[in-house]
Amino acid sequence: MAKVVVDAMAMQRALTRITYEIIERNKGVDDLVILGIKTRGVYLARRIASRLQQLENVTVPVGDLDVTPYRDDIDHDAQGDPQVSGESIDFSVAGKKVILVDDVLYTGRTIRAAMSAIMALGRPQSINLAVLVDRGHRELPIRADFVGKNIPSSQRERIKVSVSEIDDRDAVEIQQA
């Protein structure tokens, strides 16, 4: 059984609040780029960039980041160094303020992998993390700079984020494993 803890309106409000916090923390949008972690983080990143465009009248570059080659909890073939797929990142991150966007922050391993992938693309001025949901249970010392909602959960529960671009609706649910 699933329990909806964030509906479409609450998700929109959370992303708008995150957008305002990004503007405040960075004193505008100069040198800002946004990278969404595949899959749902990409759509959240695009929504944040769209809201930044509305508020600041500036187009902030957005890219899709696939961190799979950098995951330390997935077996990889011993074929040398991982390669970052730069197909959807057509701008440099060097010297930029990177806003990394993901749907759920859990153990921190995805974010660690994302930071490695970003560093392979160039050396940014800074990296800030924006997540829609922080559910706790960290295995690594990683914390989000911008959080839509903290949802304390047990490790037996699963947090499911639905986005209209893929799932035909916006919602966050807690599911029993």
Image: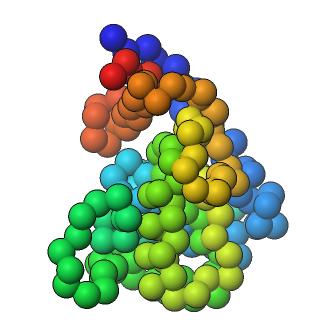
As rendered, which of 92 and 111 lies closer to the eye?
111
Please tell me in which quadrant of the rendered image residue 89 appears. Answer: bottom left
Tell me if I can see residue 133 in this picture. Answer: yes
Count of picture labels: 0
x 51%, y 48%: residue = 107
Quadrant in the picture for the C terminus: top left
Is residue 2 left or right of 94 when viewed as pictured? left
- Vertically, is 172 above or below 128? above
x 51%, y 82%: residue = 119
Quadrant in the picture for the N terminus: top left
Is residue 171 left or right of 131 when viewed as pictured? left
- Vertically, is 131 above or below 136? below
Q: How is the image coloured?
A: rainbow
- Place of residue 135 in the rendered image (x, y in percent of width and height, measured from the top left): 56, 35
As rendered, which of 58 and 30 lies closer to the eye?
30
x 33%, y 52%: residue = 39
- Vertically, is 144 above or below 111? above
x 52%, y 71%: residue = 115
- Vertically, is 173 above or below 55? above
> Residue lying furthest top in this view?
1
- Place of residue 14 in the rendered image (x, y in percent of width and height, measured from the top left): 62, 37
- Place of residue 168 in the rendered image (x, y in percent of width and height, measured from the top left): 29, 32
As rendered, which of 131 and 29 lies closer to the eye?
131
- Place of residue 21 in the rendered image (x, y in percent of width and height, measured from the top left): 74, 51
Tell me if I can see residue 66 in this picture. Answer: no
Is residue 101 left or right of 42 when viewed as pictured? right
